[in-house]
Image (cartoon, grey):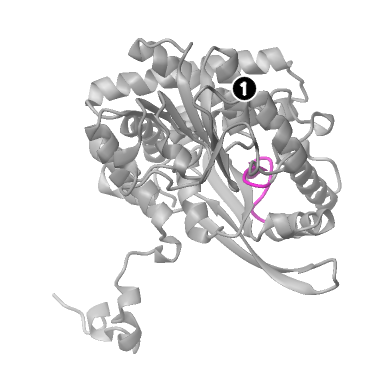
Amino acid sequence: MSSSNGPERRGKGGWDEVLDTEAHRVAPGSEWRSELYRVALEQFQRAADVLGLEDDIRERLTEPRRALIVNFPVRRETGKIEEMTGYRVQHTLAMGPTKGGIRFAPGVSLGECAALAMWMTFKCALLRLPFGGAKGGVRCDPNRLSVGEMERVVRRYTAECAPLLGPDRDIPAPDMATGEREMSWLMDTYSQQVGYPVPEIVTGKPEVLGGTAGRAPATGLGVVYCLEGALQHLGWEMAGRRVAIQGFGKVGSVIARELVARGATVVAASDVSGGVINDRGLDVDAVVRWLEEHRFLRDFSGGDAVGRRDVLNTPCDVLVPAALERQITEENAGSIDCSLIAEGANGPTTPEADRILAERGIKVVPDVLANAGGVTVSYYEWAQAVQREAWSAEEVTTRLRLQMQDAFGQMIDAADRYETDWRTAAMAVGAERVAEASRMRAVYP
C-alpha cells in the first residue's frame, strides 16, 4: 500500500539537478578519496575478503569517523600574514582514544591523513594497543619556516584542533618534520588552555616534560626487530646481509646503525636531496656526521652519487624504504633487486607493486607491522604519563622487542591460516580485532 505523503511522492525536493550530477552519485566520503587512500582501502578490502567481514562492518571501517579541516593565519617574520590549512582525521573510536602523528609537508591533504589514520587503526590493533587510528598535519614547507614561524604554526594548529584533542580523546605524536620540540609546544599550548600541565596529551616529548626513555629510536628499532624475526623465519643470518635504505632520517639512520652493529653492511642510502652507493659498504657513522653538519646527504663523498629513488634498484639482500609513500610502484617493482623488503615508511608499496613482488618471490614485512615501534613506545609514554611513572630505557626496549616479536608471530600464523601474504595477514589480524570491537559495541542509539 502506497502513501500519498510518502517520500516517493516528494521526489527529490527540488534538488533534481544537483542530485543527478556525478559528484552526488559517488560514495559518501568522496572528499577524502586520494591515491594513497585508494592504496589503504585496497589493502583493507583484501584483508576483509580473507576474513569474510560482513558488509556493514566493512562500511564502518572504510570511512573515517571524524575529520576536521582548519584554516588559520600565521604571521611570518616579514610581518606578512599567511593563511595555512591543517587537518586531523580520526578513523575509528571503537578501540579507545585515537592516536596518530602530526606531519608538516607541502603534500599534506585530507586524503593522505585519512589513509594514514586507517593504517594506524590496524597497526594499533595488531600490536594490541588500546587506541584507534588518527593522523593530522599542516600543509606547508617546513624547510622554509623559521623557528619562530614553526612555533606559531604548531601552537595555532593545536588551538584550532583543541575540540578534538585530549588525553582520553585523541593523543598526537611526532611525524614528518616534527619532533620533541614541536610536541613540547603542543603540550604547552593545550596545557595553557585548560589551566594545568597535561603531559599525557601528546607523546614524543622530551623526557624532562614527561617523555619516555627510548622513544626517539623506537620506530627504527621496531623495523630491526621485525627484520630479525623475518630472517630467522626464513633461515637467513643477519651477518653479511647487504642493505639499502631509502630515507636516512630519524628512522633510517637508526636502522642503519643497528643493522651494522649486528653485522650487516649498508651499501646504499638516500634522503630528499639524493642518494649514495658504495658496494664495499657505507661508513654509517660518517653519513650521520655529514647529515648533522650539512643537513642533507648531497655531496657526501663516501660513495657514488645517485638519484634518491635509484637506491631502490640497488642490488642488495634487504631493501628498507623509510622515506615517503608510493615509492615502489608498478613501474619499478620489476627492477627491485633484493630478497626481502622491510617497510620503514607508511604506504611505500602500491597494491600493483605488491602483486609483482609476490610473483618474483620477494617477501615484504609490511608497514602496518614493521614501523609500529613508534606508536608502541608512544603508548608506553602515554601510560607512564597517566600513571605518573617513569620506566628505564632498558625496560622500554625490552617491552618493545617482546611486543614486536609477538606481533610478528601473529602475522606468520595468520599467513599460514589464511594462506595469504604477510601484508594481508597483518592487516587481517588487526581488522579482525577492530571488527569484533565494533560488533560488541553495536550501533548507538
Taking the image as drawn, is residue 48 in sight?
no
Q: Which residue is drawn at 50% across and 37% down?
A: 95
Whole-percent x and y of residue 229? 44, 16
Disc 1 marks a residue whose amino acid type is: Arg
Along the viewing direction, whichever of 235 and 133 lies nearer the viewer: 235
Along the viewing direction, whichever of 39 and 131 lies nearer the viewer: 39
Whole-percent x and y of residue 331? 32, 49
- Quarter holding residue 150: bottom right
- Quarter holding residue 144: bottom right
**Magenta span:** 163-177
Q: Which residue lies furthest to the left in this view?
A: 1
Q: Which residue is drawn at 49% across and 26% down?
A: 279
Q: Residues within 10 Å of mark 1 (few under 14, many from 20)?
A: some
- Quarter holding residue 173: top right
> Along the horizontal axis of the image, is 155 left or right of 314?
right
> Along the horizontal axis of the image, is 425 left or right of 113?
left
Quadrant containing the N terminus in the rendered view: bottom left
Where is 86 relative to 99, above or below? below
Where is 84 relative to 178, above or below? below
Q: Residue at x 28, y 82 (%)?
A: 20
Residue ID for mark 1:
257
Along the viewing direction, whichever of 29 and 83 lies nearer the viewer: 83
Of helix, strand and loop, which mostly describes the magenta segment? Answer: loop
Whole-percent x and y of residue 236? 38, 11
Residue 231 located within the stretch drawn in magenta: no
Badge 1 element: helix
> Along the horizontal axis of the image, is 359 left or right of 378?
left
Q: Residue at x 41, y 32 (%)?
A: 366
Residue 169 located within the stretch drawn in magenta: yes
Along the viewing direction, whichever of 358 and 9 lies nearer the viewer: 358
Where is 167 relative to 146, above or below? above
